[in-house]
Amino acid sequence: GESVGLHLPTLSVQEGDNSIINCAYSNSASDYFIWYKQESGKGPQFIIDIRSNMDKRQGQRVTVLLNKTVKHLSLQIAATQPGDSAVYFCAENKGLRDNYGQNFVFGPGTRLSVLP
Amino acid sequence: DTGVSQDPRHKITKRGQNVTFRCDPISEHNRLYWYRQTLGQGPEFLTYFQNEAQLEKSRLLSDRFSAERPKGSFSTLEIQRTEQGDSAMYLCASSQGHIPYVLTFGAGSRLTVL
């Protein structure tokens, strides 16, 4: 069936290094993607989004790359900080094509641990 | 506006009891969503409102679950005859009514069924 998944369930990085979190999706109709960060005891927090007509988008210390050919999404965090420790989810949506935009499908998440 | 608010944050109940969660979305958002999240998993879609109309319900939403948004503002999610399998975090999110439909989540209501 259609699903969003992650290659690595856990990722440990040294403070100051760059982090790369990967996500694979299988629904070729998905045309909008969001990365969320979830800290313990909190709801998911929007980080960055990308539409399928783009292959790269940059934010503050974060970059999302989209490879539609292999249905792969990645989140790059530059100069990882202790505050980046959290679970990161990618979510896919067909919202730019249908009228409702409610069909977000979330992956299981990757836990990022930043080592001092 | 302080974002999406959910109440209560934690609820412990005995199996068979009914529970109700409330969500207050961002005021200018006309779309409201309920998701369920179990430990170690991503959020799973339950249901969605546009204004007061409930437009979609997931198959996860059994007949023991009911959601309302009577005036197109706050929403409630009620679970009747709770079961231990209902233990989860119930997340509410809202979004604007136009592209992009970025979900803004609340902190969630954690349910523990004993």
Image (cartoon, rainbow, N blue to C red):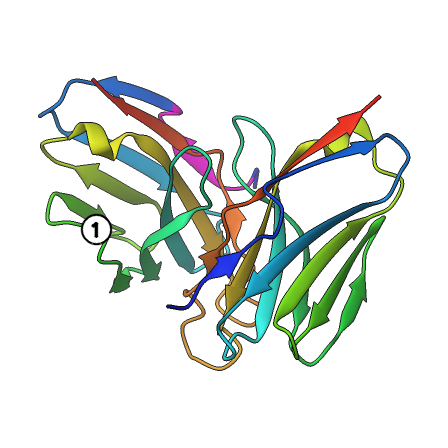
- Against B110, residue B98 (above or below) is below
Residue at 28% from the left image edge and 53% from the top image edge: B71
Quadrant of the snapshot with the C terminus of chain A:
top right
Please provide percent x and percent y for residue B46: 30, 52
Packing grade of label 1 (10 A; few <14, some 14-19, many >=20) is some
Please state if B3 lies on the left or on the right of B81 as rendered: right
Report in which chain the residue with disc 1 lies: B
Residue at 22% from the left image edge and 48% from the top image edge: B67
Quadrant of the snapshot with the N terminus of chain A:
bottom left
- Against A96, residue B87 (above or below) is above
- Against A88, residue B9 (above or below) is above
Please state if A91 lies on the left or on the right of A46 as rendered: left
Please provide percent x and percent y for residue A109: 55, 45
Q: Amino acid at mark 1?
A: Leu
Determine if the magenta segment contains residue B56: no
* Callout 1: SS: loop
Please provide percent x and percent y for residue B51: 34, 61
- Against A45, residue B53 (above or below) is below
Residue at 61% from the left image edge and 72% from the top image edge: A71
Please provide percent x and percent y for residue A57: 78, 66
Task: From the image, tell me which residue sits under label 1.
Answer: B61
Please state if A12 lies on the left or on the right of A37 as rendered: right
In front of the other: A26 or A42: A26
Please state if A94 lies on the left or on the right of A8 as rendered: left
Residues in magenta, as a range = B3-9
In front of the other: B69 or A115: A115
Residue at 15% from the left image edge and 18% from the top image edge: B14
